[in-house]
Image (cartoon, coloured by chain):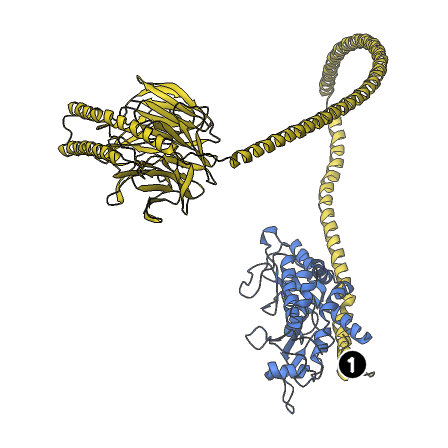
Amino acid sequence: MAGPGAPGVPVARWKRHIVRQLRQRDRTQKALFLELVPAYNHLLEKAELLARISEKLQPEPNDVTPATLQGPWEEESGPDSDQVLSPTTLRVKWQEEEERVRRDCGEMAYQAVEQSAALGALESTLEEQQSRLAALGGRVAELQEARAQQTRQVDAQRALNVAQRAAYEALRARARLLEAALRGLEEEARDLLERLVQRKACAAAERNLRLERQEKAKQERMSLELKKAAKRTVSISESPNTIADGIREETEALALTAEPLSLKSEAGEKWKRPFRSASATSLTLSRCVDVVKELLDFKKRRGHSIGGAPELRYQSIPVCVAAQPPSQVQDVLDAHLSEVNAVCFGPNSSLLATGGADRLIHLWNVVGGRLEANQTLEGAAGSITSVDFDPSGSQVLAATYNQAAQLWKVGEVQSKETLSGHTDKVTAAKFKLTRHQAVTGSRDRTVKEWDLGRAYCSRTINVLSYCNDVVCGDHVIISGHNDQKIRFWDSRVPCCTQVIPVQGRVTSLNLSHDQLHLLSCSRDDTLKVIDLRVSNIRQVFRADGFRCGSDWTKAVFSPDRSYALAGSWDGALYIWNVDTGKLEGSLRGPHCTAVNAVAWCPSGSHVVSAEQARKAVLWH
Amino acid sequence: MTDDKDVLRDVWFGRIPTCFTLYQDEITEREAEPYYLLLPRVSYLTLVTDKVKKHFQKVMRQEDISEIWFEYEGTPLKWHYPIGLLFDLLASSSALPWNITVHFKSFPEKDLLHCPSKDAIEAHFMSCVKEADALKHKSQVINEMQKKDHKQLWMGLQNDRFDQFWAINRKLMEYPAEENGFRYIPFRIYQTTTERPFIQKLFRPVAADGQLHTLGDLLKEVCPSAVAPEDGEKKNQVMIHGIEPMLETPLQWLSEHLSYPDNFLHISIIPQPAD
């Protein structure tokens, strides 16, 4: 703030000049007028005030002057007229006066009367008021009394309340005491219970220990015995031949009976369906001829074979020439306690096997359109995933969740053989057409071939993916996998011979009787027919509403390969005509849950479907 | 320093005796007496003429009264110029008191701004203060002030309270110690002889060589016509607050002490009277 001119003690010239000039300015412009202006304004105000006062004052004199003028004039004129007026006029005046007075009197009297009337009215109202006051006073007294009474009542009530409160307090104290006692007792009870539980636990542990010890002892004993037994040498060199012979003879008999049967059924078919194409007929005829030839060959071979042929084959017996698609439900029953996973007809069409998640295999007789329980095969250690009859119909092979496949003889309740070696669920177990051989597929990504005669694994095929189903032809093993591929294996070649990709995880495979066509079902909700001669997909079956219910939904060919059948997730069965490639129809029956598996009996007359609940349904 | 304070006081309390007379064509009910008033130089006409208005309205019919305006010798007086400036510019050479004619009719729309209320004056005043501070401190000082400080400035002016006003205005007159003055000096130079209302330019208080600029430097730079040649006759008066400071007065000091309350140096350049 310090001005640049300030530092010098003698103030700068310009500043002095300014100060001087300012003073000069004020002297000329301000000081002269400082008193003058307010004085003028004061005067102005005063002048105004005076003007206003004078304004007010002016009209008054105008009012006053006429009055003062008039007054004396009247007074002067009054006595003048008095003197002039005669007594008559005076009388008249007096009379007027009298009249006026009288009128006034009358008026006053009237007023007096009116007043007295008003007074009377007022008095009466006063009386009324007083009486009302008295009445009210009485009411007041009454109310006061009532009030006193009520206060007394209130007092009494209050006293009562006090008493009750005391009683309540006492009760509460008692309740508290009792509660404390109850709590104590409860604690004691809890204590006792705990002690009891502890003692029980101790006892249980002791018992467990004892049992364990017993078990261990038993096991030791067993292993000792087993060891002992292993040391013992047993000669069994003779037995395989004899068994083989027995079976051979049995097959022969069967084949012989089969021949006329097939001829007969063919004739029957011809009679039933006269428009069947000539080529089909010739095919079946040639097939029949083949069969006969083979049978003859077999006999011949048999005559030659002394040491036992290395491959003993079951003969495929095409007993059905034309299958009838099912149309109606014949029988419904609760086959298992839970899910029914597998269903399979025996070769002679009258025996049916179902396998379920309840670890049981039931055998049923198909008699007169009904399923009659025949037998239950027990001993499976896990849920059954697949069942298969051997071509002779005397053995049943089942795959289980318990990492094994098991073999039963029809007629024996307990399992004969267990094929163990897989390290995960076994999803499929099928007999091969060669005798005493089987193939299993498992989720441990292997397919194994088994020698049933010795119950050992003859070959392990390692695959990259879960195996969901396997089927076997004469020399070929076909496996369907989770990686959407169908793989082909030859018994004679170590590696995979062919891979056919499909869209969707493969859930089932089914080989037609002539081994020329393969039916696959996959999770893209399609069925595919693969021609094995050219190894490609010939047909794809789809249907609106058909959805594959699970990873192990099974689809089958009809025995004459005219139809393909599969069950959908909603419980309906879908049938496609293989010849036309069209959907033949869908059947809705008693199934309410997804259909897991279907089986078509080799005679072509019946179909059985099994569902995820407990039902198995026989269709005709 | 005491001198400086006295200067501020003298500037603040500068008064101009004024005689207000009603315009002859105005219709009155009575004869209108002239009205005398000492107008503060630093204030605005419409801010201090309430009494004048009342005085003349008394003698007029109610329906004839519209917005008041003032005129001096045919020139309408702009209310948004400080009174001192108006006087210096228009009437400094005439005899006192200053005769102002009061009008209530035919408002000169093209010359004057309307002044509907005191709020309009306040708004104008504050905008001038802000403009000045923008020049002096890049608005930093005024922006740091609170609303109540702004109000105090205005109330100080409105109620003619020197101490109240300067308590706040002091901050506006400060400058950083490392500098020799403001960034730019807020000034306006008025001339009656030109059409242009006023000259306003950016001008620093200190020259490039550190020398303080003087009033003479400013005039030479901005308005050379106003400065008399060295040898020639003096033709113009340079007037602030009714005085003629010497041309060697430092501009920074002038700005700090002789600025009007709106923080501007209002410099009038008027022809030298012929006497």
Q: Which residue is at 63% across, 82% downward?
A: B219
Chain appearing in yellow on the rendered image: A
- Could you say which quadrant of the image residue A121 lies in? top right
Q: Position of residue B235 (x, y in %)?
A: 63, 84
Is B40 or B104 nearer to us in this picture?
Answer: B40
Dot 1: chain letter: A
Of the 4 image quadrants, the one containing the N terminus of chain B is: bottom right
Kind of element beneath mark 1: helix
Q: Is residue B127 left or right of residue A343?
A: right
**How many residues crowd mark 1 within 10 Å: few (<14), some (14–19), many (20+)?**
some
Indicate the position of residue A598 as horizontal and vertical percent values: 34, 29
Q: Nearer the viewer, residue A61 or A149?
A: A149
**Above/below status of B48 relative to A99:** below
Amino acid type of the residue tagged 1 in the rendering = Arg
Is residue B275 or residue A424 the one in the foreground? A424
Q: Position of residue A233 (x, y in %)?
A: 48, 35
Q: Is residue B127 left or right of residue A187?
A: left
- Indicate whether A306 appears above or below A394: below
Does residue A440 show up? yes
Which residue is situated farthest in the bottom direction here? B231
- Left or right, A542 with respect to A227, comes to left
Q: Which residue is mark 1?
A: A16
Q: Which chain is blue?
A: B
* In the image, residue A237 above or below residue A185: below
